[in-house]
Image (tube, grey):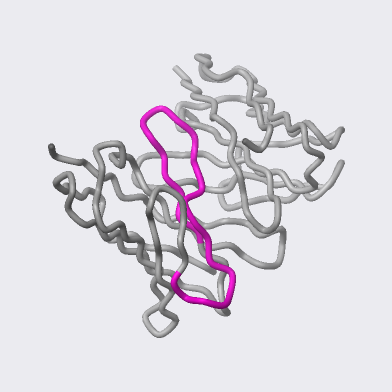
Amino acid sequence: AQSVTQPDIHITVSEGASLELRCNYSYGATPYLFWYVQSPGQGLQLLLKYFSGDTLVQGIKGFEAEFKRSQSSFNLRKPSVHWSDAAEYFCAVGEKAAGNKLTFGGGTRVLVKP
Amino acid sequence: DAGITQSPRHKVTETGTPVTLRCHQTENHRYMYWYRQDPGHGLRLIHYSYGVKDTDKGEVSDGYSVSRSKTEDFLLTLESATSSQTSVYFCAISSGNTQYFGPGTRLTVL
């Protein structure tokens, strides 16, 4: 069965500093990979996704993620964090068969210091 | 915006009562999903549907049932609510192998 691990439950970063959120997955083949963001009291918004091809993918709000097959990782990065990036971030892996069901990591909550 | 609405948005109920949550979509997507969100667990799949009257179980389906009699509506029913079902419930649709989520329903079972 597939699984996703986000090792960091909380991260605090200063505004303007860089951010990297870790995601490790377990899946038998090349997965579909996703990052979603959830602001307090809100639903989930898709940041970016990886299906195949170029392993560095660009998303919205200045985020990017890199797929590394050898490390089973799909880490999310942003060069310079804004106060509005304070939110919870979820990594997910999609099961290509059976309706592309998603398995989520536990999430990483990001706090941005002024 | 994937045209997904959920109702109600908030509900408080008592243990043992039945509860039905509704997910409505406006764009005729074939696949629909119900997830629950709990701290530390991310989102977990309850049930999903791949067409009218076609549904299947997810990871945490015990205590839940679903129905889909029309393409646009996917209902989640808690037959007899328990306190362990206090959670935030999200509906999603799939478009181009990507899932898009509704705004969520916060359910509290007392």
* Residue pictured at 86% horizontal, 33% vertical: B70
Residue A53 against residue A86 in the figure, above or below: below
* Residue pictured at 58% horizontal, 48% vertical: B45
**A51 drawn magenta:** yes
Question: A76 or A62: which is nearer to us?
Answer: A62
Quadrant assignment for the N terminus of chain B: top right
Q: Is residue B92 left or right of residue A71?
A: right
Residue B91 against residue A75 in the figure, above or below: above
State which region is magenta.
A34-56
**A10 drawn magenta:** no
Residue B64 against residue A26 in the figure, above or below: above
Q: Is residue B11 left or right of residue B74?
A: left
Where is residue B91 drawn, in percent x and y? 62, 37
Question: A63 or B30: which is nearer to us?
Answer: A63
Where is residue A94 drawn, in percent x and y? 58, 62
Question: A1 or A55: which is nearer to us?
Answer: A55
Where is residue B103 drawn, in percent x and y? 55, 29
Most distant residue in the bottom direction: A70
